[in-house]
Amino acid sequence: MKLVQVPLREIEQGAGLVEAITPYILEYREAEDLAADVFRTCREVVEPDAARLGERRREANADSWDVLAAGGAVLGRFHAVYDVDETRLGFEFAAEAATRFYRLLRQQRIVRPDLLQVRRMMSGNLAETVAAVLWQIGAIKVSLGDLQPLFHVDMRRNRSPIYIDVKGLASHPAVNDFVLGSAALLLRNVEFDAVCGIEAGSIGLAAALAQRLAKPMFFARRGRRYPEASLFEGIRSHELFRKKVLLVDDTLVHGWTKARVIREIRNWGGEVDACFVIFDRRQGGEKDLAALGVQLWYLTDRRAALSPKVPREISLLTDREYDEINRYFEDPAAWHAARGLEYHHIQPPAEES
């Protein structure tokens, strides 16, 4: 059994201690295997001075293992406490190492979106509330580059400590319903005849919104499969003539792909003056769309996601991660330079400029 295979809930960090619960009774052999993998994980990404795993110590309904340095010094401990219908896990290390374990385990939490918790803990606006539930389901991902690679952005040429992935919304029906309902309410203020999604991430989102708003829907391909192929699927040229189209996508960074689709819709005789996304990273995309005469509508953005009204109990962010993300958004080029990374000033591809 490996640590990354264990589903966890109630992951909490204290002073040098990380605790979590797996809703399963681990067998002794499974716990032994898990302790061995905790040691390997510790040595690889948490505490490089770890040399060996100590012998198992059994006390009543609990097992413990020491993580030892080459000279025998104790660097940390792993505990497994067997309850009636669950197993409580404890990771006892120095403060920095404990925080690393917390960040590792956080990725394995059992996702149980809780809108009641959000309402109970927050007093924010709609954008902050949507951001909170995205944090809850793990749609906002964070990496400092130490435990896992930094994320690729800007046509995979630059790096980022944060990544927004809302493509898994449908895996969480209650959250999906809340987000789509909020989007539909917002878009009641927009006049349009049809909805256009973009291959492939926003096709499902566009279809669900179109159904809620009782509008026809089609989608744009990322590119033509052969020269004479249509860029659009689900609509014919004459059906688009003088129709007002709402362009829908999941996130917005620069808006260059959207610009290509907007131009093609207009070439077909359609009209586009509105674009909707769930998450705006606020990295210039709104200005790119405005330059084309298109207004941006969005549910939430990075300001809402990093708002102090979204408590850390929901985002599970550490102070270091929060500061790193803010430094990145303040000046991506300087953030890259500080990390010794090359920064590429990306321009729209020639066919989309």
Image (cartoon, grey):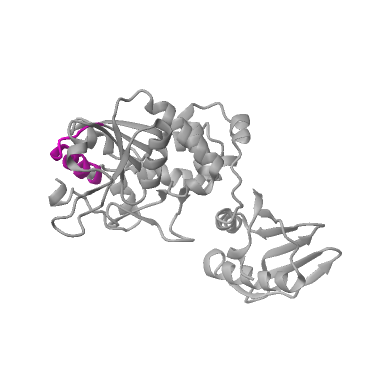
Q: Between residues 26 and 224, which one lies in front from this camera angle?
A: 224
Q: Is residue 29 above or below residue 127?
A: below
Inspect the magenta stretch and tell me whether residue 298 lies in it.
no
Task: Tell me where residue 182 appears, x and y as whole percent.
Answer: 46, 31
The quadrant of the image that shows the N terminus is bottom right
Q: Is residue 71 left or right of residue 145?
A: right
Q: Residue at x 62, y 76 (%)?
A: 70
Q: Is residue 250 above or below residue 55?
A: above
Q: Which of the 4 image quarters holds residue 286?
A: top left
Whether residue 306 is visible, yes or no, is no
Q: Residue at x 40, y 46 (%)?
A: 204
Q: Is residue 115 above or below residue 123?
A: below
Q: Is residue 55 left or right of residue 96?
A: right
Q: Which of the 4 image quarters holds residue 284?
A: top left
Q: Is residue 235 left or right of residue 306?
A: left
Q: Between residues 211 and 306, which one lies in front from this camera angle?
A: 211
The quadrant of the image that shows the C terminus is top left
Residue situated furthest top in the rendering = 189
Whether residue 149 is visible, yes or no, is yes
Q: Which region shows up in magenta?
A: 257-273
Inspect the magenta stretch and tell me whether residue 264 lies in it.
yes
